[in-house]
Amino acid sequence: MAEGDTLLNAAIGAVVTVVLSFTTVSPVLGGGVAGYLQRGDPGDGLRVGAISGLIATIPFLLLIVLFGGFLFTGSMFGGGLGIPGGFVLVLLFGLILALVWTMTLSALGGYVGAYIATERESGR
């Protein structure tokens, strides 16, 4: 299909991650699909899986900005709901940790997906 087209394969893996987000292993599955489509060296699977995880976090970040942004901007300028700045920093740290977690699991899935594709092509 799109063997070697990194961005397309990563986007397909990201769509799989978002669609299966109700499962706890959706980043691994999405990265696995991206790595399987990428084929080639499992190192390429790591890369395309991590890119897939990064792309998959974009819709969730947009939702957070859309629905939660007014709470934080209001508190920074003295209005809003009075959320303390420390809470904003803790939430920001949590978002960064979630991004790293998703990218790591997607990279792991990408590695496994590329490995499976390689083994399947070699006939083992």
Image: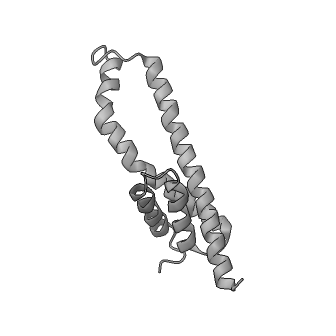
| Residue at (52, 38) in percent of width and height | 96
Question: Would you identify the image quadrant in which residue 36 lies?
Answer: bottom right
Question: Would you identify the image quadrant in which residue 72 lies?
Answer: top left
Front one among 77 and 65: 65
| Residue at (31, 13) in percent of width and height | 78
User: As displayed, is residue 60 above or below residue 1?
Assistant: above
| Residue at (62, 70) in percent of width and height | 114
The picture places residue 48, in percent across and down from the top left corner, at 56, 63
Quadrant of the image for the C terminus?
Answer: bottom right
Residue occupying the far bottom of the picture:
123
User: As displayed, is residue 13 above or below residue 103?
Assistant: below
How is the rendered protein coloured? one colour
Q: In the visual, does 101 lie left or right of 16?
A: right
Residue occupying the far front of the picture:
23
The picture places residue 90, in percent across and down from the top left corner, at 50, 25
Q: In the visual, does 115 lie left or right of 75?
A: right
User: As displayed, is residue 77 above or below residue 37?
Assistant: above
| Residue at (48, 68) in percent of width and height | 9
Count of labels in the image:
0
Front one among 44 and 17: 17
The picture places residue 22, in percent across and down from the top left corner, at 42, 51
The picture places residue 92, in percent across and down from the top left corner, at 47, 31
